[in-house]
Image (tube, rainbow, N blue to C red):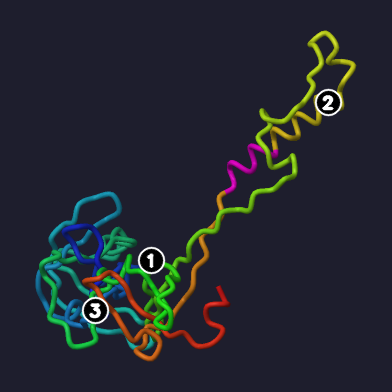
Amino acid sequence: MTDRATEKDWLLIGRIVGAHGINGHIKVYPESDFPERFTEPGERWVKKPGAPPVSMRLTSGRYLEGKNNYLVKLAGIDFRDQAEDLRSAELVVPAGDRLPLDAGEFHVGDLIGLSVVLQSNQQQIGTITNIFTTGHDLLEVTLPTEEPPSSENEDSQPVASQPIAIAPPSNLEEHPSLRAKAAQKLRRKAKRQRKQKKPRTLLIPFVEDIVPTVNIASGYVEITPPEGLIELA
């Protein structure tokens, strides 16, 4: 994999995770497999949350062994407080600045949103929603959300549709249990409406043995998962 797409006109190549030392160096977590994005001098863009990208020149950079980070120096960032101010910003390049790919390589942004199907029977499993690069690339696949089963229990019905005999206002004092029951049902209904089921996800190693087919043009990947992998979701 290579660069990760961010917004329409930009490619996310790294995330600034902190400052290093006192001379304005920044630590960058790579979202690109091209080392030259962080080591070769040239124009880059820094995008702070909620702000448009700002052009800055990368003057030097090197890989930090064992840290999975790059130590980068940007022109004009000469003090630690300036570097700290860039924490949580993104390092981006124009979307047209895509570097050439070797066979079997893909731009991460092109993988996001692809359908995931079993090669054996073409059953759709879910959709790729993220990529994790922790030693070996992992595809995060979001599985379809299952609709909660309908229940015949009266508690699952809307309160307004239930045949509840409400006592006249003048007699409410004589029916505290009725009022408490109605209030309890209203609270349960409100809780059900607030509750949203979190989508289930599955992590699939992005290796050829498990993901033998990637069809960007048709919008899908085929997988041959080892036994038990799908059941883990």
Position of 48 relative to 211 (above/below): above
Marker disc for residue 82: none
Which quarter of the picture shows residue 1?
bottom left
Q: Kindly report the distance in space between the C-alpha atoms of the residues bearing marks 3 and 1.
A: 15 Å
- Magenta extent: 188-195
Is 98 positioned to the left or the right of 148 in the image?
left
**Viewer-proximal residue, 225 or 111?**
225
Residue at image position (90%, 16%) is: 174
Q: Is residue 15 visible?
A: yes
- Tell me which numbered mark, 2 or 1, is placed earlier along the sequence: 1
Q: Which image quadrant: the C terminus?
A: bottom right
Q: Kindly identify the amino acid type of the residue bearing the numbered disc 2.
A: Leu
Amino acid type, label 1: Thr
Q: Whole-percent x and y of residue 137?
A: 37, 82
Q: In the drawing, does residue 139 fall left or right of residue 35?
A: right
Closer mark to the observer between disc 2 and disc 1: 2
- Which residue lies under the disc numbered 3? 106
Direction from residue 211 to residue 188 in the image, left or right: right
Q: Is residue 36 magenta?
A: no
- Compared with 54, 125 (above or below) is below
Which x, y percent locates residue 47? 23, 58
- Helix, strand or loop status at disc 2: helix
Residue positioned most to the front: 121
Q: Which residue is mark 2?
A: 178
Tell me the number on the disc at residue 129. 1
